[in-house]
Structure formats: C-alpha cells, structure tokens
Amino acid sequence: MKPSWGAVIFLIWSGAMACRFIPDNPDGAQLYAEKCASCHGAQGEGLRQLIPPINDLRRLQVIGDSLPCLLRYGISASPARGQPPMPAFPELEADDVAALWGHLFSLAGQPEARFTLADIRRSGCMD
Ligand code: HEC
C-alpha cells in the first residue's frame, strides 16, 4: 500500500507536537551523581571534616527553603570548621533543583518527599 502524504505529514506533525508537550522531567539521582557526588559522596555521606554530609534529615530540615539559594549562589568557605567553599550551580533550573531536593530527602531515608516549583519559588532565589 502506498502511504498517503496526508498520513505522513500528520505523523510528523503529531510527533513534533508530542515532543513539545512532554515535560522535561529531570532525574534527581542522575543530577546528584553528575554534580554533587564527587564532593558529598554517592550516598551524601560527606568527606571527613572537609565536606559536610547532606543525607541527614535534621540538617535538610534546618536548611529548609534556603536550599535553592545555596545551589544558585554557592556557599563561602567556613574556615572555623575547616570547610572549603561550595561552588554555585547557576545552570540548574527550578525543575532540576526540585528533583535534586527530592533526591537529597531520599538519601536521608524519605523517598516519598516531593518538591514543586512553588517550593522553589518560595526560596526567592529562582523563578
Ligand atoms: C566542589 C565540592 C562540592 C560540590 C561539587 C558540591 N558541594 Fe555542597 N558543599 C560543599 C562544601 C565544602 C560545603 C560546606 C561549605 C561551608 O559551609 O563552608 C557544602 C555544603 C552543602 C550544603 C549545606 C550543608 C549544611 O549542612 O549546611 C548542601 C545542602 C549542599 N552542599 C548540597 C550540594 C548539592 C545538592 C550539590 C550538587 C548540586 C553540591 N552540594 C555540590 C562542597 C561541594
């Protein structure tokens, strides 16, 4: 059977439309592995006195809504604690940060924690 041009054009068009509407769904575990694990460790365990652990629920609760700001602007060194600065990650967009934030809670034993764009906006550091 000879395919009709109308059908071919429809398929190309619908494929293009589908791509436009598939949300970019960043993977927090993958982002963590790429951008954070080299310092904070594969499980967020930190590195001796040098890099703080970030798989601790209490710490994550204390950090709270300032997490997006920490990632956007980095953290200056804490010489008193012997800690170097943490780099900024200005390339991370709000949905990347939401996914990463959820992954930190997974590392802290709370895999059901979810963060939305509204949570990110509340930080005032990203829109
Ligand atoms: C180059 C090493 C390095 C990388 C990469 C890095 N961090 Fe950090 N991070 C640090 C250091 C060092 C500190 C402590 C800074 C200080 O207080 O002096 C820190 C602190 C933090 C804190 C605050 C901890 C607390 O208890 O106050 C969080 C949260 C955090 N990092 C998350 C992340 C996330 C998420 C990523 C990946 C997007 C990341 N870090 C990538 C080195 C790094």
Image (tube, helix red, strand yellow):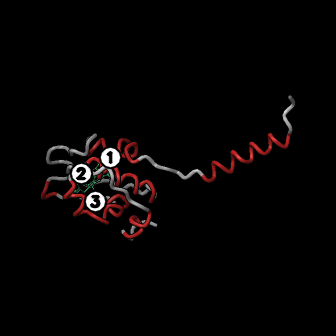
Quick check: is the Cβ at mark 2 less than 8 Å away from ligand 1?
yes
**Residue under the image location 35 percent in, 41 percent down:** 33
In which quadrant is the N terminus drawn?
top right
Eyeballing the image, is 47 above or below 69?
Answer: above
Residue 55, placed above or below residue 4: below
Neighbour tally class for label 3: few under 14, some 14-19, many 20 plus, Cα within 10 Å = some
Residue 54 marker:
2
Q: Which residue is mark 3?
A: 75
Give the SS element for disc 2: loop
Residue 34 spot, x, y in % from top left: 38, 42
The quadrant holding residue 48 is top left
Q: Tag 3, which secondary structure?
A: loop
For this view, does 8 lie left or right of residue 45? right
Q: Which of label 2 and label 3 is nearer to you?
A: 2
Say which amino acid is labelled 1.
Cys
Disc 1 target residue: 36
